Image (tube, rainbow, N blue to C red):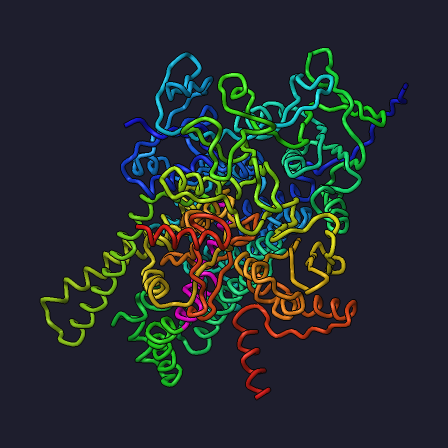
Amino acid sequence: MHPIIIIGNGIAGVTAAREIRKRNVEIPILIVSGETDHHFSRTALMYIFMGHMNYKDTKPYEDHFWKENRLDLKRAWVEKIEHESNRIIFQGGEAMEYSDLILAVGSTPNKFGWPGQDLPGVQGLYSKQDLDELEKNAVGAKHAVIAGGGLIGIEMAEMLITRGIGVSFLVREKKFWGSVIPEEEAKMIEEHIHEHHVDLRMGDELDSIHAGDDGKVSHIITKTGEKIDCAIVGLTAGVRPNIDWIKEGSEVETDRGILVDNHFKTNLPNVWSIGDCTQMRTPPEGRRPIEAVWYVGKIQGAFVAANICGDTLDYDPGIWWNSAKFFDIEYQTYGTVLPTPQEGEKTFFWKAPDKHITVRINYRESDLAVTGVNVFGVRHRHQVWEKWLSDEAKITDVLSELGAANFDPEFFKQYEDEIIEHWNQENSQQVTKTLGKGLFSSLLGKLNTFKAK
Amino acid sequence: MSVTIRESHSIVPPDPKLDKWERLGLLILGIGLALLFGSLFNIYNGNLKPVMLVVTMIAIFAGGLIYGLRTHLIKKPGIQNNNIMTASVSSRGAIGWMIGVILTTLYCIYYWKADWLSGMTQLFDPLSQAIRNKPSDQWFMYGTFYTMGVLIMGVKAIAKYRHSRYQTIRTSSIVFFQLIMAYTLPYFMSRLYNLEYYPTYFWPLSYKVLFPGEEVKTLLASKHEILAMCMLGWSLIATFIATPFLTYFLGKRWYCSWVCGCGGLANTVGDSWRQLSSKTVKAWKYERVTIYSVLIFVIVTTGLLWVFHVTQAESLKGFSGGLAKVYGFLIGSIMSGVIGTGFYPLLGTRIWCRFACPMAAILGIVQRFKSRFRITTNGGQCISCGNCSTYCEMGIDVRWYAQRGQDIKRASCVGCGICSAVCPRGVLSLENGPTDQREEYQIDLLGGMKARQLEQKTNQTK
């Protein structure tokens, strides 16, 4: 029997492998990667650079895990897919036959044709190789420029600062991550970036990159005409599916990403695609066709496993959620919160005075049903929000029981009272707190019910 | 279109190297330690002795606090783990090894060649006279060093984790228990009643309190009968009633990381080495063998000693006495001191607690099978980054559970709460609410409500 071959050992590919193995103990599975020998957590790359962890600490499974679960690993780059003969061809010419092929080849940093974008010292940050390159580029560097204000940009700024390397951070948008988060939150993040000594330039862009006498990057010029000396240029203007080799070396149909139906089938028989590199022909309602997000990769890995093993399941990722950390500020979101509320939607926003803590809940004007939440600097429970969102709970009920969603550690200050007070000031429909967080408040709650009786 | 080119004026980030205040702190600390070292050669005599003691103590306190506070307070509140894996002291580099060798050597000298330290011991005479009304001895000096370490490094830990109220309150608690309950109080009691009793160390950690030996005999023979009975009573209550009761409600953390001096030392002096504990399955297997062996060892020894004590059977005398000696040497000295603390910079901070402490073994059994305590995970938010596992001092692979969305109920977890603090995505929370409300939620397969539906569907088809 030929193996199921998975190209890519990131979270999507590895989840697919594990889920197939759970459903089928017999079938041989081979995971191919040119990047690393073993699966590691891509989101943890920054912590290696910052000295929080070593590379080995970012591997979610010990090395003996793969053999024990009969998941074969191969370190190689794939060059071609010959679907007529069900074969993949590796660099160097070796060929292997598959029963099913899963493409989980991830992303690659965007480059927009800036002059000098391929100079030494200019780089993105996505792969282990990128990290190794950054280690080299950081030696002796005094200043860096980061172009592009997404999550990777701010991570890269945080990383370089820990080595005492100054960072000028060029962000095209007027508000930080303004395509995703609303203005108030963006403003708070901008403040926080300044607090960490980053030279943040909102509304400015990279124009060109220039080399010094040694051939390495020496400075950049911004669109507003400023010259900034730097030894490193981080290109962090988003990522795109890593499919150049697939376009060249196969007949897999692609657009911006590898096109799949809602079972993750490509146009070719027995060839599937999941994760960052994948573009849904008909994405589920409210979702984008390409979602380069850890959690989505994980979900898609499980769905493709179900479909390959014979459970025909339409892709339904459930309620959207995501998280990030901006220097010291944690961010979680559940449901949909766009930068400005959608048609028929209202937004309730609260910020703790003088603190980097905010809660934003969006809800439908007509029936007060909650549609999404953004929390910064406070942790909320996934399960509770998922239930509120899928039950279309009213915001007034949600606020009165908001403590149930609080996932902060013990003894942390709880803000439910302030949040409710803020709502009551802004709205005629008054809310009273019925549930706080934790054992103590649940006992108090019981006491109150008892008193009421 | 032509553009005007301007020179940039950027903001300068803080230099990761030590600044002048940190260097000053380390210098003063170094002077304090050098003075301490000098006392070994009996050069501080007569009236010079109290002066030198005060100067030495002030230098150690001042230097330690200046460095400890400065190094964390110049950074913004938040996780401060930058360069831990590259700094020599915290990554088994030359400085780490050096500290390990010095600590191990010191422990060996303490246990077996204490007379080498007589000069240093005598330096502490004025302090011992003031507190206990008797000359210093090696154990008084040891207790003083220990308490100073917990105090200075406890303040440092509070500065480091000041963004987390769980950590600041917990650290304050361990500093309080060390300073008051395990140092000041016992020594004042010994001064007033001639009874040196440590109310926060219970059998089997402090095995002698329930051995029918000197300590119990001293209590029984004391002329302060009521006080002595209270102490003996507390020893029994603490071990057999308070321990299971509190552990049911709070988990073993109420003791291991809020009260116990061993845990206190690990979480203050040892905090920079917590990441060195092994997270492998192999280490976990090894740990279960060793810790329960020690527990059986101490139970058998205590039992035999009592059987001999009651029956006075000569055949048991030598055997049970010998067993007690072996236990004291192997477990009381080698495991808890020489390896348990000396190897901090090499194997991580909770070696003793994890591999050998019989108290932790009992607490762990209660925690694992009959306790409300667990670490809950937040749905599907885990990104498998590994910070939780890396910074678990007990070597628990926290991520293994977190990425499956599974609650963590492990016998070894001391509930220090650092996994929850270092998690960048708000995934982990220590909880002891009623377990019947615990939601059995597995994100294992797929995110969202659909995940459970899918799982049900596949289960049905099987």
Note whether residue B37 is visible.
no
In percent of width and height, residue B5 lies at 87, 22
> At 35% from the left edge and 22% from the top edge, which residue is drawn?
A97
Residue drawn at point x = 36 percent, y = 83 percent: B223
Residue A135 drawn above or below residue B118: above
Q: Main secondary structure of the magenta part?
A: helix
Q: Is residue A2 visible?
A: yes
Q: Which quadrant of the figure has residue A179?
A: top right
Specify the quadrant of the image occupied by residue A451.
Answer: bottom right
- A103 over B408 or under it: above or below: above
Q: Is residue A247 left or right of residue A325?
A: left
Q: Which residues are magenta?
A: B246-273
* Residue B269 magenta: yes
Left or right of A204? Residue A445 is left
In-front residue for pair B161/A210: A210
Residue B462 versus residue B337: which sits nearer the camera?
B462
Residue nearest the observer in this picture, A377 or B13: A377
